[in-house]
Image (cartoon, rainbow, N blue to C red):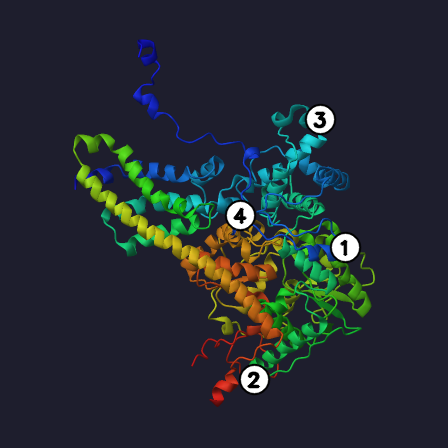
Amino acid sequence: MSSSELSNIPEPDEFMRIAHKPPRSGWMDIPVVFKPGTYCFPAKAKNLKILGMPNPREWSPTDEDWKLPENWREIIREGFKDRLDKYRSFKLFMDICVRCGACADKCHFFIGSGDPKNMPVLRAELLRSVYRKDFTLGGKLMGRLAGARELTPDVIKEWFYYFYQCTECRRCSVFCPYGIDTAEITMMGRELLHLLGLGINWAMEPVANCFRTGNHLGIQPHGFKDTLEFFAEDIENITGIKIDVPLNKKGAEILFVTPSGDYFGDPGTYTCMGYMMLFHELGLDYTWSTYASEGGNFGLFTSHEMIKRLNAKIYAEAKRLGVKWILGGECGHMWRVMHQYMDTMNGPADFLEMPTSPITGTRFENTKSTKMVHIMEFTADLIRHNKLRLDPGRNNNLIVTFHDSCNPARAMGIIEEPRYVIRNVCNHFYEMPENTIKEQTFCCGGGAGLGTDENLDMRLRGGFPRGNAVRYVQEKYGVNRLACMCAIDRATLIPVCDYWAPGVLVTGIHEMVANALVMKGEKERTTNLRGEPLPGKEE
Amino acid sequence: MVLKNLLIQKKAAISKRWLDMILEAYPPEAAKFFKQEGNRFANPVGYTLLREIEPFYMELLEGLDAEKISPFLDRIIRIRAIQDFSPSQAVAFVYSLKKVIREELAMEIHERRLYEDLLKFDSRIDELALIAFDIYMQCREKIYEIRVDEVRNRVFSLLKRANLISDISEECEQKM
């Protein structure tokens, strides 16, 4: 070995400085890997067919070939263009972001997972990069230098993975100085994917069922009737009071619409019984409808057209039955639709009257346009006017905290009413920390159609910030009950609590209202609606 | 034990380096965020790691009392069990402590011939890894249990509503 060769050999300390890790690629070059537990199963062909949606087929995200239609690039390009022309907000959101980073650490999925593509700014970049390439001069000329990239099958896979990792909760938009609404970007991303037949079954099956039978589970009118009568029997066993179940009653004053989660799955069923008991006690002239048997609207997680299609039945049924106004139950995304879309999509509801409480005379001026009142406004008003006899001591076994559901809190601003009701029906109420509630509330991790069991790992990642705050009040105040007013929350927060704060159970608010409600002529109650002994009635 | 005194003296440096190594497993954007001394509710992963690592390390120096050490491990592993890690990656941070100690105390160990002490402490870390593996499995089993419960409850309530099941009611029970 010559001396010149020897001098080329690095010194020991140079060896020490060698990084043993390969350089990381830029985000555009990191392909998506579909691991069990982190993605939702694709929409079944039968569900897309009945809705007349394009490219129905059997496929799986783990397949190499997603069986895209031959002209898929043109379809996306056209779809993109169409939406940029139609929705000015979309065009604005594509252009306006300055990457200030205010949103970056606000997404529950990023906070829980650490996956940078869950930072809202980067989630939006998934679309923006393609937008720049196809629709901006800079992007066309400069390519990657201008943050633009080609649309490839891998980009489509990435869209599917990450737009179904956004629960459209809109927490990030609270912090964006420009008001960019990432939920709307996700909605556009999902609309584009649907043009290629790429949806998830946990959203599309409810949509198909809703379209065909009227509710997410495809419960038929007689099944709906049976279910409500079944609840009435349970109520009679507990209170000794036989209550009516008004169904499709023409000329009733109020049409009551609630998500099917309320009458299908525990613990929503107890909340449903709560509404029934409250309405009976008030002697309310109301009706359920077997046609408008679903307040939820998974069209919101599909496309604007689908929101409108599924929502149309609400006003149609109000008109058919000749009611004066509409009252809606405890639900989350249902209220984003009712509050922000229903009026312009299927209104004007000029055949209805200004909602007025027949008990207190309160005119709900805030609903002048939609004619639909949130039950929490209705009940808070009743309590404010001292129209309910309540014994909060019956809920003394509950140490309660309240989870603001994303849509009522951020899309409607219903912040104080649920708290007012809870404080009046139970004696032990503790708030979670300020930066996890109200407008800043953390999502349950399972909204926007993601609450399915095959996606549980991802839901628990996204649910960590919420679970972490629940665990804090559990340790500090002994909280054992998490109250919420959303049917999806009532289902998805159960696993979140079970994993992050075991021992905390989930409840709807009207379940607690009904337990505290002292009804005229009731027998001495010994159990709550769950059949558990009331405090002081334990054997 | 001379090594123990050194490990105590250097606790701040060692736990900081250990934490850095744990965070290296995440993408740089996430590592940067987790590293911030943020609010415990805004940055729960970072807060848990930053707050737990040093006391956890000090507890380990005292011995390997599974009851005392498990809560620390649980808080860290509960998070890693649902993140994008393979099982080995999720518990590998326990072993990285060996590397940290070797690097941080390389000179002292060599000069003062502390290899026997080091071997003993290595065995303690090996045992710790076994406890970590148990906790990791408990977390994963909990996830499977939650998933089964979710599906079972859904099916059960459907059957009940459809009047397809007739279980033993309280009335029947009283007659018996």
Instruction: Decide which of tag 1 and tag 2 comes sooner along the chain.
Output: 1
Same chain, marks 2 and 3? yes
Query: Which quadrant, please, contains the C terminus of chain A?
Result: bottom left
| Tag 4 subunit | A
Q: Position of residue A84 (x, y in %)?
A: 74, 38
Q: Which amino acid, by three-letter code, is at mark 1?
A: Asp
Q: Secondary structure at mark 4?
A: helix
Extreme-front residue of the structure: A1
| Tag 2 subunit | A
Q: Which amino acid, by three-letter code, is at mark 3?
A: Leu
Instruction: Kindly report the distance in space between the C-alpha atoms of the residues bearing marks 1 and 3.
Output: 38 Å
Please give the residue where the numbered disc 3 appears in the rendered image.
Answer: A137
Vertical arrangement, residue A308 with respect to residue A67, above or below:
below
Q: Position of residue A218 (x, y in %)?
A: 68, 66
Same chain, marks 4 and 2? yes
Please give the residue where the numbered disc 1 appears in the rendered image.
Answer: A343
Q: Quadrant of residue A209?
A: bottom right
Q: Secondary structure at mark 2?
A: loop
Q: Nearer the viewer, mark 1 or mark 3?
A: 3
The numbered disc on residue A108 is 4
Decide if residue A262 is on the left or right side of residue B19.
Answer: right
Instruction: Decide which of tag 4 and tag 3 comes sooner along the chain.
Output: 4
Q: Are marks 1 and 4 in contact (CB under 8 Å)?
A: no
Please give the residue where the numbered disc 2 appears in the rendered image.
Answer: A523
Instruction: Kindly report the distance in space between the C-alpha atoms of the residues bearing marks 4 and 3.
Output: 35 Å
